[in-house]
Image (cartoon, rainbow, N blue to C red):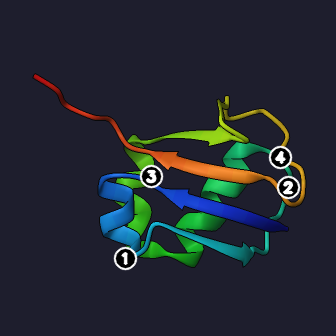
Amino acid sequence: MRLRLRYFAAARDAAGLAEEVVDLPVSGRTVADVRAALVAWRPGLARVLAQSRLAVDQRFAREDDVVGDGVELAVIPPVAGG
């Protein structure tokens, strides 16, 4: 599955870059499947991904939402503010 990945805040730090286009071997088509493939592909993101929300084409996604080929997927960690 070809995805444009965007990483924000701690996810950007863990990935070492802000965005990339990748072909991920994904076993299914849901957000949960893509999350698992990301952890396997970039193990350094595992801790951040466990706490992050994912957005598909700029909309927050549920774990059972279907992901299409060629979409933008953003990893958005929790943010503390003050």
Q: Whole-Å distance between the Cαs marked 3 and 1?
A: 14 Å
The residue at the point 33 percent across, 35 percent down is: 78
| Callout 3 amino acid | Leu
In the rendered image, the residue lying farthest to the right is: 69
Read off the residue under disc 3. 49
Residue 65 location (% of width, % of height)? 79, 33
Q: Residues within 10 Å of mark 1 (few under 14, many from 20)?
A: few
* Left or right position of 76 against 4: left
| Callout 2 amino acid | Gly
Residue 28 location (% of width, % of height)? 85, 55
Q: Nearer the viewer, residue 75 or 33?
A: 75
Secondary structure of residue under mark 1: loop
In the rendered image, the residue lying farthest to the top is: 82
Q: Does the CB distance between marks 3 and 1 fall below 8 Å? A: no
Number of numbered discs: 4
Read off the residue under disc 2. 28
Q: Does the CB distance between marks 4 and 3 fall below 8 Å? A: no
Q: Whole-Å distance between the Cαs marked 4 and 2?
A: 9 Å
Which quadrant does the C terminus fall into? top left
Please identify, in this view, whether the residue under mark 1 or under mark 4 is nearer the observer: 1
The residue at the point 76 percent across, 33 percent down is: 64
Q: Residues within 10 Å of mark 4 (few under 14, many from 20)?
A: many
Residue 25 location (% of width, % of height)? 79, 74
* Left or right position of 7 against 26: left
Q: Quadrant of residue 48?
A: bottom left
Q: Whole-Å distance between the Cαs marked 2 and 3?
A: 18 Å
Secondary structure of residue under mark 2: loop
- The label shown at residue 16 is 1
Q: Quadrant of residue 19?
A: bottom right
Please identify, in this view, whether the residue under mark 3 or under mark 1 is nearer the observer: 1
| Callout 1 amino acid | Gly
Please identify, in this view, whether the residue under mark 1 or under mark 2 is nearer the observer: 1
